[in-house]
Amino acid sequence: MNNRKLRAGMIGGGIGAFIGPVHRMALELDNNAELVGGAFSRDPEKSQASAARLYLDPRRVYHDYRVMAEREAKLPEDRRLDFVVVVTPNSAHFEIARTFLEHGFHVVCEKPVALSLEEAKTLRKTAAKERRLFMITHAYTGYPMVKQAKQMIKNGELGDILKVVVEYFQGWVPFRLHGAAKGDKAWKFDPKVSGSSLTMADIGIHAENLAHYVTDLEIGELCAEATSFLAGGGLEDDAAVLIRYRGGARGVLSVSQTLTGEHNGLTIRVYGTKKSLFWKQEQPETLLVRDLNRFDTTLHKGGPDLYEEANAAKRLPSGHPDGLIAAFANLYRAFFQAIWRQLRGEEDSRGDYPNIDDGVRGMAFVETVLESAASDIKWIKPKV
Amino acid sequence: MNNRKLRAGMIGGGIGAFIGPVHRMALELDNNAELVGGAFSRDPEKSQASAARLYLDPRRVYHDYRVMAEREAKLPEDRRLDFVVVVTPNSAHFEIARTFLEHGFHVVCEKPVALSLEEAKTLRKTAAKERRLFMITHAYTGYPMVKQAKQMIKNGELGDILKVVVEYFQGWVPFRLHGAAKGDKAWKFDPKVSGSSLTMADIGIHAENLAHYVTDLEIGELCAEATSFLAGGGLEDDAAVLIRYRGGARGVLSVSQTLTGEHNGLTIRVYGTKKSLFWKQEQPETLLVRDLNRFDTTLHKGGPDLYEEANAAKRLPSGHPDGLIAAFANLYRAFFQAIWRQLRGEEDSRGDYPNIDDGVRGMAFVETVLESAASDIKWIKPKV
Amino acid sequence: MNNRKLRAGMIGGGIGAFIGPVHRMALELDNNAELVGGAFSRDPEKSQASAARLYLDPRRVYHDYRVMAEREAKLPEDRRLDFVVVVTPNSAHFEIARTFLEHGFHVVCEKPVALSLEEAKTLRKTAAKERRLFMITHAYTGYPMVKQAKQMIKNGELGDILKVVVEYFQGWVPFRLHGAAKGDKAWKFDPKVSGSSLTMADIGIHAENLAHYVTDLEIGELCAEATSFLAGGGLEDDAAVLIRYRGGARGVLSVSQTLTGEHNGLTIRVYGTKKSLFWKQEQPETLLVRDLNRFDTTLHKGGPDLYEEANAAKRLPSGHPDGLIAAFANLYRAFFQAIWRQLRGEEDSRGDYPNIDDGVRGMAFVETVLESAASDIKWIKPKV
Amino acid sequence: MNNRKLRAGMIGGGIGAFIGPVHRMALELDNNAELVGGAFSRDPEKSQASAARLYLDPRRVYHDYRVMAEREAKLPEDRRLDFVVVVTPNSAHFEIARTFLEHGFHVVCEKPVALSLEEAKTLRKTAAKERRLFMITHAYTGYPMVKQAKQMIKNGELGDILKVVVEYFQGWVPFRLHGAAKGDKAWKFDPKVSGSSLTMADIGIHAENLAHYVTDLEIGELCAEATSFLAGGGLEDDAAVLIRYRGGARGVLSVSQTLTGEHNGLTIRVYGTKKSLFWKQEQPETLLVRDLNRFDTTLHKGGPDLYEEANAAKRLPSGHPDGLIAAFANLYRAFFQAIWRQLRGEEDSRGDYPNIDDGVRGMAFVETVLESAASDIKWIKPKV
């Protein structure tokens, strides 16, 4: 059986939204799926208006995701949605994802998948029970040079990993509060919508996921600090985590959304006994490799000696920036391949996309960091 | 009347092609157009196989562009193609583009639109006569920060422009001849397919177009050198042009495809009496602005004080790389708006996309450079 | 009374040494002092051979620093040394520095000034008692753009400081153990010579000193991890410190000498509510300033609007790299001015050079970090 | 016979001068020479005041260079100057240099050594006749990574050289005319003092010298444009030169002092059939090497696999910036070695410092460029 074009629905992502359109572009980029319906807003008019811009059939447009799940589930197989994309604010993720899983749909969900570790585990259980696929969009792992980094480490090129330094620095909190553009992202400051964590749940889990994806290291224990500088409401907007990985490597993970002037500064440095790697999301097309004898090599996306996994993830040759939408699309491509495998009745296998296990591990990380940060026992005063 | 989703056809761009898929992704990115048919190869089987990967209706798939033009022209208006995309090797551009113009279709054509200035002028005449729109995809002008640069200059922020330095350096010629990957792009070395110019026609016109787009300067006179280092067949793979712009500014335009280690090194520097600009295609998200008093400012895509034209061209916020496909899509968006204006019966107006005037000016530039390069009168020997 | 050229002696720094010659070049750079004698090695022949290369009078050359101190102290005032420079391995610093202080000489000492906080305090007491000046060469604070950073913060340009991120990453440990050049710096791995700390005492105190110099923040409490990856002997070659500064700012200080491919990667980032700063020792001529509204400004040494303190510290105009020797020389210049003030009988005043207070604070920092790192109470295991 | 410390005199370089102090620091940096006298100004008081800051013996201080040459020539051999350093404005170089050569002194002279090719040739003849050494301070060739570049090319690592792109861009002309700091460098705008060329004579010859030093290529013929944008007086402040090197390589040399925001932007790119090199004076510690297969390698000063010539030119290990003064000092070191060889009666041999042959070649280059620029025959108008 040939692959067929898949049908997608979206919940959230109406006019004015940021991440919804990115998902739509990404899922359609390779022409393997098509958005055919959705509940873009709770407001019926706004939902239809959003859909009209996408030339969607108004009969596939909803304002209540429960109604959407029920009706779409009843459609004949050749019209029914294959999967839904959940791009609402955080607090709605859990219920929507669970509802669609239970109605037989595969689910793509923005991070964090839930507001608590408990909820994330419930989603994992539900997906397993329903045999539905679940993708969480840690899109930065979709970049070609991230895949190159992963393969280099997997193949032992770095020797033993000694240290991992990962940072995710943003500056939108002071910008929204005091800068030229105000008011946007307001829901993120509301614990009822955002959850009990601002920065860790928003970007800390991206940082953790990237480090895990690239190195495959498991955290053995950690020690953390979290601070609420400007966000208010007890929500942390800055955190730093000392990590002891199993096997002896050490890590420093720093995240913040309150660092004036930062844009989307996600970087990872991995140091091994033979080589080290440096990758920077804002300039994702290259990977810096440094070796023991102090030669720095810059690998470029599209270069001839990259790993197959890196080459398969590129859309354009070297020197032609692919961008984040293409990285996003790489996640979708792997997700679609998993759906097609299931449609063909093949054995389940782990595709190269972040799944609900990543979602669970991410929420566990958030809760552990906040617990450690709440403890004052770790501090000592400097000698004089 | 609302805008409607537009229907596209493609000529060339079958399996294994580079630029065809980029066009497909770009034209569909905003969901305002859809590829519905094409002649992807002269080989019927290969054409159908390419189409199948795109889930196209086999009845809209051809292997002879003339047949395609005739049959598609006869389809009812609500099924007929709105425009075609020509992504074949150079030598076929002219005939294909002219044929579709004459059959009533708008045309998007890869550069160079023709093998000679004469042909380019014919296309301009044909498009005007048929009242069809014609886009040539100088896609680098689609980047947000290029639009920012253009607006800064247009609004006089740089003072008087004194100097323009534009470079387009690639290294694929030695790479293909001696490097790890061989054989690809072979047709580019064949003057019958490529035309009488290799590098000027391939990327020299991109460099010229970028400089013209950003500065709006017109070349008054020029003096050029062109060299065939490795390409053979009398085809230049390296050129440098001294330019006197009308109004007194000076320019240096350097292009080469034989520079070992270069990827896609298109850069532009514009120096004015008050400020200067530097932009680099390989890191397109930022624009360096330097002022008289030696403060360097780096503007980021998505920043709050950019010109509206720059902001409208972005898809993602600052720190989230948009990439070249999105830049390409910006050209298509402007092209679609022009089509919709025509469908609504509005007055023709110049949209923000490169059109056949750019195609004509580009071919004139190529021919002038080669003519100047052929003259030895300009050289003098150094004193001793 | 005019300033007169000062006379310097050196202990250590013989043929083959790295830091001794740097001191000699730095102290003589502005022609305000001259090296006239020293004990360059405990081996009399090697000491004389080292001196001969410097065209020194053999009568001022010693192999025993005690003899040197005694004899030089007895010379008439117009020939006697004004100060000595101590550039031996760590374990000898304390005794040598104390001996020369007690014989009436000002002292310049490489870091760490001693092997323990206790010893450092003794030096402070001795210097105060003898009214001798004491400089510790945290030379990185001598760079013009570091002084610019300090002044910007002092003058409130950054608003409230929220976060300080300082890193000092080197890679010589794996390089010496496994790379192309082996054997060098062997004494650093010997706790008897190096002291009980490798990396914190060697470069951790540079990082702490830089952060303190630039921000003037005082550490309130800290929580640290230290690791011995490759160095052996229980000596840490990697450390990370979470810091709570007094007043609410947070810090992350990371240092390592075991990071493959790093050279001398000292960087500091200071984030305030209005602006942030980024400075990098390996490219010291510029300072990146980022503001709330996401404009990045690069300040260049020698630019017209820098603070006077930054301009006074430059030797060459913008675009002409000054280098580390010149930064070193800036410390010496401030030290000489203090000596001249004392010669003129002026009131003691704090010059712009690191003194024994910095030495004491540095050793306190090292000991506090190692104490915190030794405690396991801070770690928690991740939830599952 | 052992080397002895050499004695230097200086002409020009009084209080407020820029380049004089750089020479003093550079010539004394390795402690192999000492400034003992000079004529720092034509004004006796200013000359003595300048000397006093350097603690010089007032009896060795002059205000008339002719008197200085005569008197110093009569001093006994063990007190007499070994060489003089000429750092006056351009127009005085020739007469001063000739005078000191004729009085038996070796000469170090700032560029340009003369105002015309004719004068430069006279200096060459005089130096040869008097058997005196002559150094012109093209100091940028003293950087370690420039020497690495030269050796890589000499040893064939790049394969055949195809193209050389050298730029020297400064922005002080608009800065002085309209920026924050005015008035300085006024003599440079006066043809009587500066000569008939502003930018070519000031920095164009540095660019030519760097390209020649690194590649050893000889110019076969050239075609140039020169422009006077802002400088007035018919003095060019911008130029671009197309070059055909002997043997087939091509070059583009661009220089300007009127490019807003540029500091001291000297860069060189050399492209060969196997590898290419990129070096940038403003970040001189690294050398970018790119190879056919698109791996970019960054070599660092002090790395283990550099050529001996590069390692011998460093003063500090990798990651510790040496700066321009040290590069200058490398020229002096080679010059001193040549003097010592002569003192030992050894055969003359070419040392690794720029000599009067470079001075002659530089002036020939300036005059040829200006002659080519004056010819309008080379320009053609673009086709339409």
Image (spheres, coloured by chain):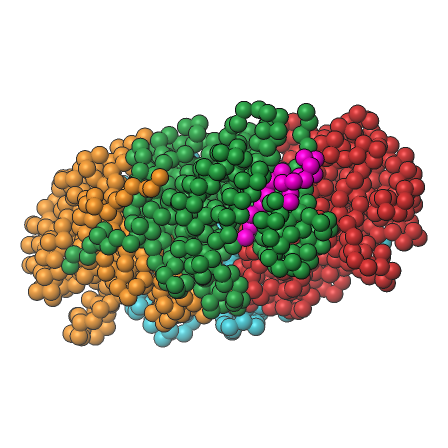
Chain colours: A orange, B cyan, C green, D red
Q: Residue at x 16, y 39 (%)?
A: A191
Q: Residue at x 34, y 55 (%)?
A: C226
Please, is residue C93 above or below residue A329 in the view? above
Front one among A252 and C287: A252
Q: Is residue C80 magenta?
A: yes
Task: Report the side of D348 relative to B300 (left or right).
Answer: right
Q: Which residues are magenta?
A: C71-88
- Image coordinates of residue C349 in percent, x first then y, are 52, 27
- Image coordinates of residue A363 in percent, x first then y, are 18, 53
- Image coordinates of residue B307 in percent, x first then y, are 42, 35
Q: Quadrant of the N terminus of chain D?
A: bottom right
Residue A338 visible in the snapshot: yes
Q: Quadrant of residue A102?
A: bottom left
Q: Quadrant of residue B202?
A: bottom right
Front one among D248 and B370: D248
Residue B239 visible in the snapshot: no
Q: Residue at x 44, y 29 (%)?
A: C154
- Image coordinates of residue D259 in percent, x first then y, are 62, 39
